Image (spheres, helix red, strand yellow):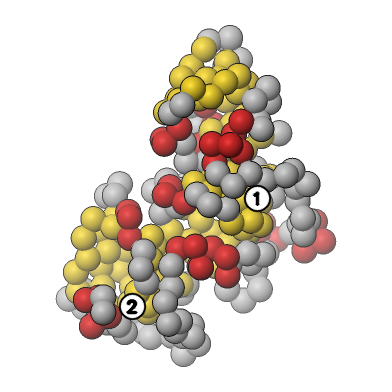
Amino acid sequence: MNILENYIHQTMTLHLAGRIKIDGILIEVGSDIIVLYNGEEYMYIPTTHVLHIKKSVESEIILPTDEIDPLKEISLRKILVNAKGLFTEIFVTPSQSIHGYITNVLSDYFVFYSPVYKTMFIPFHHLKWLTPYQNNQIPYGLEREMLPVHPSNMNLSRTFEIQLQKLIGKIIIIDLGIEAYQIGQLVAIHKSFIEIITARQETVFIPMNHIKTVHFQ
């Protein structure tokens, strides 16, 4: 039995890496994931990013009347598989969220379709939390017909590294392209590093385990 199961339906405070603090009612505890209700939405938080947890002193959050059905055992993979096709907000950095839906779940990464960034590849261990949309909302007020059911016909590989190998020669955007060196042509993969050439033809090597998202045009 997970010790946190003793606190189900109590309000807890989670401290995550990146100085993130989240308060919510503890709904479910899985092998590698925690489910909180923050008063508006359910948050699925991988424990790998949790620094510590404590019981909240006081809270105005009310237990939801439409509480999710408890599962015998939940895990990050099961949550991702169950969320396929559902409009979802995900966080891979503390300050930026991505909106869209999961299309595929592979061995160590999942494929996410965003109306803004299109097809994205995201390693499991960089997902900070996931929040499914409520009340049949659609990202950006788009018509559902504008969001393809099968957005990519690319053959997917089992692992993130092998999938990146299929992108050699393409212009890729890493971690949403916030920094200039995160956009360039992927020219090679050297064990734990990828090699890209930026717009100014600078060669940059980026550790693969630091890559949070990859997408391409």
> Which numbered dot is residue 114?
1
Give the image location of residue 16, x and y in percent: 29, 55
Q: Between residues 54 and 30, which one lies in front from this camera angle?
A: 30
* As drawn, 31 above or below 177: below
Residue at disc 1, secondary structure: strand
Residue 187 visible in the picture: yes
Give the image location of residue 15, x and y in percent: 25, 58
Give the image location of residue 40, x and y in percent: 46, 74
Left or right: 96 as drawn, with respect to 121: left
Residue 180 visible in the picture: no
Q: Quadrant of residue 86?
A: bottom right
Identify the residue at image location x=77%, y=63%.
Answer: 144
Identify the residue at image location x=68%, y=22%.
Answer: 169
Residue at disc 2, secondary structure: strand
The quarter in which the C terminus is drawn is top right
Q: CA distance from mark 1 to mark 2?
A: 29 Å
Left or right: 151 as drawn, with respect to 25: right
Q: Amino acid at mark 1?
A: Ser
Identify the residue at image location x=46%, y=90%.
Answer: 65
Q: Residues within 10 Å of mark 1 (few under 14, many from 20)?
A: many
* As drawn, 22 above or below 106: below
Left or right: 27 as drawn, with respect to 102: left
Q: Between residues 170 and 9, which one lies in front from this camera angle?
A: 170
